[in-house]
Image: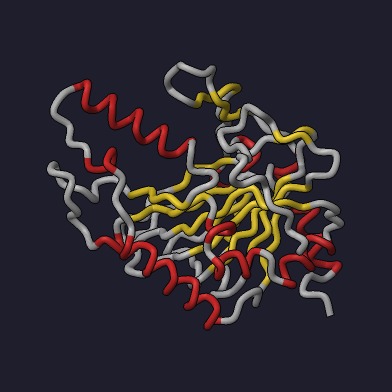
Amino acid sequence: MDFMTDQDVQRYQEDGYVVLDGLLTSQECDELRQRMAEIVERMDVPEHCRTTFSTYHDEQLKIQGNADYFITSGDKIRFFFEKGVFDDKGEFIVPKQRSLNKVGHALHAYEPLYEKVTHSPKVQGIAKKLGLVSPVIIQSMFIFKQPGIGGEVTPHQDATFLYTEPLGRVMGVWIALEDATINNGCLWFIPGSHNSGITRRMVRTPKGTFPLTDFIGREQTYDDEKFVAAPVKKGGVILIHGQVVHRSAENTSEESRHVYTFHIMEAQQTRWSPDNWLQPTEDLPFPPLYT
């Protein structure tokens, strides 16, 4: 029997997202979390994260360092921290394991456990059920949503950052490694908002200019009352259309909300924008999902 039903497909097409239970077992979730704990334990904190502000020039160097580190992370495993986790000497003021916002963006390529989940028969089955002919993996992330400090993610559309021509070729696969609840910052969606296109894009700026990325178009405001919560049990998955508007609140609870998420693009008859921050490289072309 297919993991994804015809009814699930219809919900995804109508709402722009769908919640499916049981993509992973509880044990598989724990193994991914344990492996991430090992990666974090061994991480080298990038120098720019430890830069202390003493002058305006130092601050600019730190901002530039952050931007360089981000824009070249598509084919690497890199560490992105929550605000306020370092003191003015660049030392941790919270436990290392609780300092991170996310790790990205190539876990699917270099970490065997994550690669296995990304290319699992269930995930391939989802893509086939949705009629994808040549899906490729464009990025992956482990998102921590730390207890008490996991920040709000404001309303956005993934296609703002991952733009294709035509639109509608990108889908997020968002796997809850712990229960995602209203209390610890689950996702909220505006059902049907994937039918309205996008209003802005994040693009690379011309070489030699700073900042390295900029937004074109306008930021939309959304009515809070239109958002619907999408809690999901540990091991469940949310499929997210690239244009559906979604957000998450800050995590004010004492529970983390660990997630492994990756994005798939239908590569057949699709142009990946050369202006996107994320670009395939010689080291890591976008790998095919079907293996």
* Image position of 1 with respect to 135: above or below: below
Residue 143 percent location from the top left of the image: 46, 57
Where residue 206 sits, quadrant-wise, is top right
Residue 184 percent location from the top left of the image: 42, 64
User: Which residue corresponds to the image point at 67% horizontal and 47% vertical from the top-left?
Assistant: 286
The answer to which of 69 and 6 lies nearer the viewer is: 69
How did the renderer colour the structure? Answer: secondary structure
Number of labels in the image equals 0
User: Which residue corresponds to the image point at 13% horizontal and 41% vertical from the top-left?
Assistant: 88
Quarter occupied by the N terminus: bottom right
* Image position of 213 with respect to 51: above or below: above
Q: Would residue 130 be found to the left or right of residue 152 on screen?
A: right
Where residue 163 sits, quadrant-wise, is top right
The answer to which of 106 and 3 lies nearer the viewer is: 106
The answer to whether any part of residue 226 appears in the image is: no
Q: Would residue 152 be found to the left or right of residue 201 on screen?
A: left
Residue 217 percent location from the top left of the image: 60, 22
Residue at the extreme front of the image, as rendered: 282
Residue 81 percent location from the top left of the image: 34, 49
* Image position of 70 with respect to 291: above or below: above
User: Which residue corresponds to the image point at 52% horizontal and 55% vertical from the top-left?
Assistant: 141
The answer to whether any part of residue 284 appears in the image is: yes
The answer to which of 286 and 197 lies nearer the viewer is: 286
Quarter occupied by the C terminus: bottom right
User: Which residue corresponds to the image point at 61% horizontal and 32% vertical from the top-left?
Assistant: 276
The answer to which of 12 and 68 lies nearer the viewer is: 68
